[in-house]
Image (cartoon, rainbow, N blue to C red):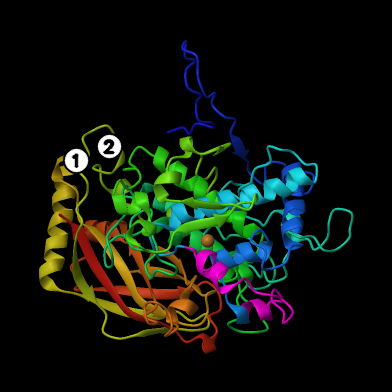
C-alpha cells in the first residue's frame, strides 16, 4: 500500500465555515537535510533545548523538570552530573502531580508519550519564538529505518561543539555509548524490526498471550512488566542501543538506557516522535483494528481515581489529557511529513531472516483485506515450559529446552495442519508465543537475540529491568516479561516435519556484553498457544 504524505484537507464547503481549519505544524525527518545544524529545524531545537536547560530544576518548564516527568532517580542523576547538592528539587506536591509519570508496559504507553511530546514541543516552540525563531517550529523525528545512513545518530547530536567549533552543544551528551559501548551510536538494523505493525489488535492479552500492538489493559502504569509489541521492538531496543552502558563501570547505563534518565537526552524526543509516527502508520495499515474503544482506555486512569496525565504548559497552565483526547491525529495540531514506516530495511534485518506466518500461509492477513475480518482468538493456553532459571552473562549463549505437553501441543498442531491443508478456508491457525518470564537483573543495557530450533525469534532489550528487579517496585521486583511470536517458526517446523519432537530448543544470545555483576536471569521460558 502507499502512505499519504499528508492528511487530505476536507473538501471545500459552500456553507460559511465558522472555524477555518487551523494550520498544522509539520514534524519532519531529522535526516531530511543531512541531520546537521545547517537544518534550521535542528538548530532551533538546540537553541530551545539550551533555553530549557538554563532554567532551574524546580521550574516546571526546565529541561530537567521535563526529564523528571518521565522518570527520576537521584542517585543516577547525581552520578551523571544532572543533580548537585545545590539544586533545589521541586516541592513534594509538584513531584506528586508531575514526576515519575511515564507509562510503560501498558496500553497507555502510546497516548501518554504523545501528550508528553506535545507539551515538550510547545515549550521548545515558545523558547524558539522568544528568541526570534520560526513560529511554526515542530519537533523532528528520527526514522532509523529510513535507509542509507539514517540509522546513525544525526551529526548535530554527535559532536560536543556548536557549528562554530565552540563547546556546549546542548544536543550532545557524554552518556551515549551506542550498541557496542564504544561511543559509536547507531541502531543495528539486524536487531530491530517493524513487525509490530502487522499485529491487528491494539490491546492484546496478558502473558503468556500476545500483548498486542499497543500493550495490555492496565491502570496507571509507571513501569509495567509486559511491554506491547511496538514498545518492545523497536522502542525498547532503540533506547538501549543508543544509550548503551559505560564500558568503565559495569551496570552504569547511558542516559537513554534507563527510563529514569532517558528524558535528559535530547535524542529521546526524536526517537519518541518516530514511535508516535509509527502509531499513525499502524492506523493506516489495512489490517489494523484501530485504537481501543473501551472507556477505560479513552478516559485514562484518572477516571477511575488514579493519577491524571498532566504536563506543564509554557504559559504556566497545566495541560491535562486523556488517551481519547490524543488518539486521533486529525484532532491535534500537528502531523508528520511522511507515514512510510521504514523506507529501506536492510536485507539482513531480523524481520527478513525471521520466518513469518503471512508468507507461509495463503490465509495470511493480506488475503483477508476487505473481507469481514473476525477478530482473532484471545484464548491462551500454556503448551510447555523449561524447568529452571536461565542465567545470561558475558557474550556466551544460554540454552534451554522447552518441553511441550502432549494435549496442548496436539491441539496446536491440528490447528496449523488444518490451516495449511485447507488454505484460506481452513481458519486462522493458533498463534504460538514464546515467553521469557520474570526477567531480572541490574543492567538495562542488556539485550539478546532469541533463537528457537536455530531460527531467530527476534531480540529483546531489558529497558526498565533494574527498576522492575527492585523489591520497592510496584510489582515487588518480579522482573519483566517478554513475549515473542514464533508462529512463523512453528509453521516452518510443521511443514518440515520437525515439530513432532516433544521439545523446542531455545538459545539466548547476548547482542552485547552482559556484565557478570548484573545477575541477569530469566525465571522461566514457556510456550503458549493463542486461538479460539
Ligand atoms: Cu521511550
Q: Is residue 380 left or right of residue 274?
A: left
State how far apart marks 2 and 1 are (Cα). Answer: 8 Å
Q: Residue shown at 31%/61% (left/top)?
A: 486
Q: Nearer the viewer, residue 367 or 463?
A: 463
Residue 150 visible in image: no
Q: Residue shown at 29%/43% (left/top)?
A: 365
Q: Which residues are magenta?
A: 76-102
Q: Nearer the viewer, residue 164 or 64?
A: 64
Q: Residue 465: x percent and y percent? A: 46, 76
Tell me which numbered mark, 2 or 1, is placed earlier along the sequence.
Answer: 2
Quarter of the rendering containing residue 343: top right
Q: Residue shown at 39%/78% (left/top)?
A: 479
Q: Residue shown at 23%/67% (left/top)?
A: 528
Report which residue position mark 2 lands on: 367
> Dot 1, crowdedness within 10 Å: few (<14), some or many (≥20)?
some
The answer to if 158 sits in the magenta stretch is no
Q: Nearer the viewer, residue 457 or 20?
A: 20
**Depicted 521 relative to depicted 299: above or below:** below
Quarter of the rendering containing residue 107: bottom left
Q: Residue 254: x percent and y percent? A: 63, 72
Per the image, label 2 sits on a secondary structure element best described as helix
Q: Nearer the viewer, residue 389 or 216?
A: 216
Disc 1 residue lies near ligand 1 with CB under 8 A: no
**Depicted 485 relative to depicted 374: above or below:** below
Residue 261 visible in image: yes
Q: Check contact, mark 2 vs mark 1: CB within 8 A.
A: yes
Q: What residue occupies the far top of the structure in this picture?
A: 14
Q: Residue 433: x percent and y percent? A: 28, 64
Q: Residue 93: x percent and y percent? A: 54, 70
Q: Quadrant of the C terminus?
A: bottom left
Per the image, label 1 sits on a secondary structure element best described as helix
Amino acid at each position: 500500500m502507499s502512505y499519504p504524505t499528508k492528511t487530505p484537507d476536507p473538501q471545500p464547503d459552500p456553507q460559511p465555515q465558522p472555524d477555518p481549519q487551523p494550520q498544522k505544524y509539520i514534524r519532519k525527518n531529522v535526516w531530511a537535510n543531512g541531520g546537521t545544524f545547517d537544518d534550521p529545524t535542528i538548530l532551533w531545537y538546540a537553541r530551545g533545548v539550551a533555553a530549557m536547560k538554563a532554567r532551574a530544576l524546580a521550574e516546571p518548564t526546565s529541561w530537567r523538570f521535563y526529564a523528571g516527568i518521565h522518570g527520576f532517580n537521584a542517585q543516577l542523576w547525581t552520578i551523571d552530573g544532572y543533580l548537585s547538592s545545590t539544586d533545589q528539587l521541586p516541592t513534594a506536591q509538584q513531584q506528586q502531580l508531575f514526576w515519575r509519570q511515564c507509562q510503560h508496559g501498558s496500553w497507555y504507553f502510546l497516548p501518554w508519550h504523545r501528550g508528553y511530546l506535545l507539551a515538550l514541543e510547545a515549550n521548545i516552540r515558545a523558547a524558539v519564538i522568544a528568541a526570534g525563531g520560526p513560529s511554526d517550529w515542530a519537533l523532528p523525528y528520527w526514522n532509523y529505518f529510513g535507509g542509507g545512513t539514517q540509522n546513525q545518530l544525526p551529526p548535530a547530536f554527535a559532536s560536543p561543539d556548536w557549528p562554530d567549533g565552540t563547546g556546549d552543544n546542548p544536543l550532545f551528551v557524554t552518556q551515549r555509548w551506542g550498541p557496542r559501548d564504544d561511543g559509536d551510536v547507531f541502531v543495528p538494523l539486524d536487531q530491530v524490526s517493524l513487525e509490530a505493525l502487522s499485529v491487528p489488535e491494539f490491546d492484546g492479552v496478558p502473558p503468556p498471550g500476545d500483548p498486542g500492538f499497543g500493550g495490555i489493559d492496565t491502570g496507571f502504569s509507571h513501569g509495567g512488566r509486559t511491554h506491547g509489541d511496538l514498545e518492545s521492538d523497536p522502542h525498547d531496543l532503540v533506547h538501549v542501543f543508543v544509550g548503551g552502558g559505560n564500558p568503565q563501570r559495569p551496570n552504569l547505563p547511558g542516559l537513554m538506557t534507563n527510563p529514569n534518565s532517558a528524558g535528559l537526552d535530547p535524542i529521546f524526543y526524536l526517537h519518541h516522535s518516530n514511535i508516535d509516527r509509527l502509531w499513525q502508520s499502524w492506523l493506516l495499515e489495512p489490517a489494523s483494528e484501530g485504537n481501543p474503544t473501551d472507556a477505560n482506555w479513552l478516559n485514562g486512569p484518572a477516571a477511575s481515581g488514579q493519577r491524571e496525565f498532566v504536563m506543564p504548559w509554557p504559559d504556566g497552565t497545566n495541560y491535562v489529557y486523556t488517551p481519547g483526547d490524543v488518539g486521533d491525529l486529525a484532532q491535534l495540531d500537528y502531523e508528520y511529513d511522511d507515514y512510510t514506516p521504514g523506507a529501506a530495511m536492510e536485507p539482513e534485518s531480523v524481520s527478513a531472516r525471521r520466518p513469518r506466518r503471512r508468507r507461509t500461509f495463503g490465509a495470511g492477513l493480506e488475503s483477508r483485506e476487505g473481507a469481514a475480518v473476525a477478530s482473532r482468538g484471545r484464548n491462551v493456553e500454556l503448551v510447555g515450559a523449561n524447568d529452571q532459571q536461565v542465567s545470561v552473562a558475558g557474550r556466551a549463549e544460554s540454552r534451554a529446552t522447552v518441553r511441550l505437553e502432549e494435549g496442548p501441543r496436539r491441539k496446536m498442531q491440528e490447528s496449523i495442519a488444518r490451516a495449511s491443508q485447507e488454505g484460506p478456508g481452513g481458519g486462522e491457525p493458533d498463534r504460538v508465543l514464546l515467553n521469557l518470564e520474570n526477567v531480572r537483573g541490574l543492567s538495562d543495557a542488556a539485550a539478546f537475540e532469541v533463537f528457537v530450533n536455530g531460527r531467530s525469534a527476534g531480540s529483546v532489550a531489558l529497558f526498565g529491568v533494574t527498576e522492575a528487579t527492585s523489591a520497592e517496585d510496584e510489582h515487588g521486583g518480579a522482573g519483566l516479561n517478554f513475549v515473542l511470536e514464533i508462529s512463523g517458526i512453528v509453521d516452518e517446523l510443521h511443514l518440515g516435519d520437525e515439530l513432532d519432537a516433544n521439545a523446542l530448543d531455545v538459545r539466548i544470545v547476548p547482542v552485547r556484553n552482559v556484565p557478570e555483576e548484573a545477575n541477569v536471569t530469566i525465571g522461566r521460558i514457556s510456550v503458549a498457544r493463542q486461538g479460539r
